[in-house]
Amino acid sequence: MILFKNHKSSDGFSLIEVALSLVMLGMVLSALLMLQHTVVEGVYGFSNRLQAVLVVKKRLAEAAFNRMYKGLYTDIKEKKQQTVEKLTVTYEQKKPAKGSALEKINALKIEKVTADWKEWDGPYFESLITFLYMPEQKKS
């Protein structure tokens, strides 16, 4: 509290002291609100990415289930797209690229699932790639 020459007792705060304390309080609160906004934005982004990874893993598990229990061992040459909860999920199964060392393994397939989505700051994608060894089954 500022004491003036004419003022003998300290009955309260001056207008300047109150204004300065409000300015400092405003600066501290604005910094805290900016920090909170950044944290919430980060949590939202990570939540979207986690959801995409879980959807992609689910699609890979469905493909594995189809291979094991439904006997679907055939090549899938085209890409299959579906939209799940604002995500575009693309599934493809293909042989290794020509000239690759993996090409020498005849029964090897590459299975790739990609999820694409958009957020306020741009497009995102997550991909999972698995290698399948699928030898031809003997006919009995």
Image: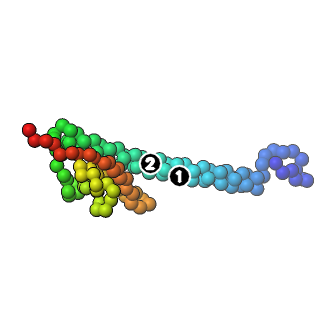
Please tell me the numbered disc located at residue 38.
1
Amino acid of disc 1: Thr
- Pick whichever of labels 1 and 2 is earlier in the sequence: 1
The residue closer to the viewer here, 99 or 61, is 99
Residue occupying the far front of the picture = 104
- In the image, residue 14 above or below residue 123: above
* Image color mode: rainbow
Which percent across, then down, holds residue 113?
30, 51
Name the residue carrying label 2.
46
Closer to the observer: label 1 or label 2?
Answer: 2
Which percent across, then down, holds residue 19?
71, 55
Amino acid of disc 2: Phe
Q: CA distance from mark 1 to mark 2?
A: 12 Å
Do we see residue 48 in this rendering? yes
Quarter of the picture containing the C terminus is top left
What residue lies at 91% left-to-right and 53% top-to-bottom?
Answer: 5
Q: Is residue 11 left or right of residue 40?
A: right
Q: Is residue 4 left or right of residue 44?
A: right
Mark 1, other Cα within 10 Å: few <14 / some 14–19 / many ≥20:
few
